[in-house]
Amino acid sequence: MASPSHPRDLRSQLETLTTEAFRPELADVDRLPTLDIARLMNREDATVAGAVTEQLPRIAAAIDALADRMARGGRLVYAGAGTAGRLGVLDASECPPTFSTDPARVVGLIAGGPDAMVTSVEGAEDSRELAESDLAALDLTADDTVVGVSASGRTPYAIGAVEYARARGALTVGLACNPGSALAAAAEHGIEVVVGPEFLTGSTRLKAGTAQKLVLNMLSTITMIRLGKTYGNLMVDVRASNEKLRARSRRIVAQVTGAEDDVIERALAATDGEVKPAILVILAGVDGPTAARLLAESAGHLRAALAKAQAGA
């Protein structure tokens, strides 16, 4: 019996994947004018959002389960190889500045480690054992969520991560771009965004990568909304780590409160530049420490803290 890693066996596997399918109508694309190539690519990209739409109920179910666990202190962990892994690391790295999350709360694991962000690490994606060791270092609990990401849905690193996490009671999500994938089957929540053959045969950094980015955006952003990290569509937990973000913080406080600039500056000074308590200081007429207490008692939800203040708590 041929080993699963045998080249002939792997080739036969790839031939069954829609993301690897050859499109003969594009065989002469290199002979077209640049604008025509751009139009063809753009037309392909326009189909991705529709493919995501078909998976929205599954995405929403995964988010609800994920948010429940994160509310109990759990972590969100992405695990993937190549483009999929890089997208997970990217999404994780953007959560602290956007939502003021602890960097340890949303984690991106890529097969081969940090070096794999910029170079190919030989054989890393083929190792389930590597995924297991990467996750073992995190000491997973039942409140954690592991999202395996793989365009093909067959990447051993992603499948290994999901299987290891599920065996330890963590919530698991499998995000793939082929139907009937092993990754989705291995996870509690399977999400298969079928984008079809790529513009360049097998180049899953294109439509598949775009689809994965859209879904990861939803997973993290909507989870943070559920955790009270926003007020409406405003990023009230933004971390003002540079001048642009400090200006955005002042603008957010102004949008919510309608206060004058000098009032906003005093409120932000009283709350060490944090937007949520500054809004409470202005709208509830409390001092900085009281605003912090109200938020702590409301699990960080600004609307609940405002209601608590208005009730005279």
Image (cartoon, grey):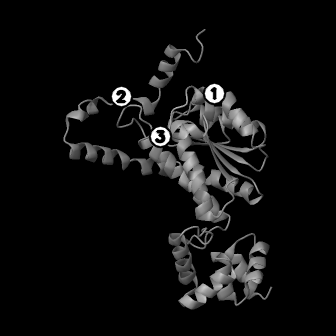
Identify whether 270 is placed above or below 36.
below
- Looking at numbered disc 3 in the image, what kind of residue is underneath it? Val
**For the residue labelled by badge 3, is the local secondary structure a helix, a strand or a loop?**
loop
Residue underneath mark 2: 22
Left or right for 202, reference 255 = left
Name the foreground residue: 266 vs 231.
Answer: 266
Q: Which of the marked residues, 3 or 2, is nearer the chain's N terminus?
A: 2
**For the residue labelled by badge 1, is the local secondary structure a helix, a strand or a loop?**
loop
Residue at left 63%, top 59%? 223
- Looking at numbered disc 1 in the image, what kind of residue is underneath it? Ser
Residue 313: quadrant of the picture? bottom right
| Residue sitting farthest toward the top | 1
Residue underneath mark 1: 127
- Looking at numbered disc 2 in the image, what kind of residue is underneath it? Phe
Q: CA distance from mark 2 to mark 1?
A: 27 Å
Residue 230, percent from left and from top: 61, 69
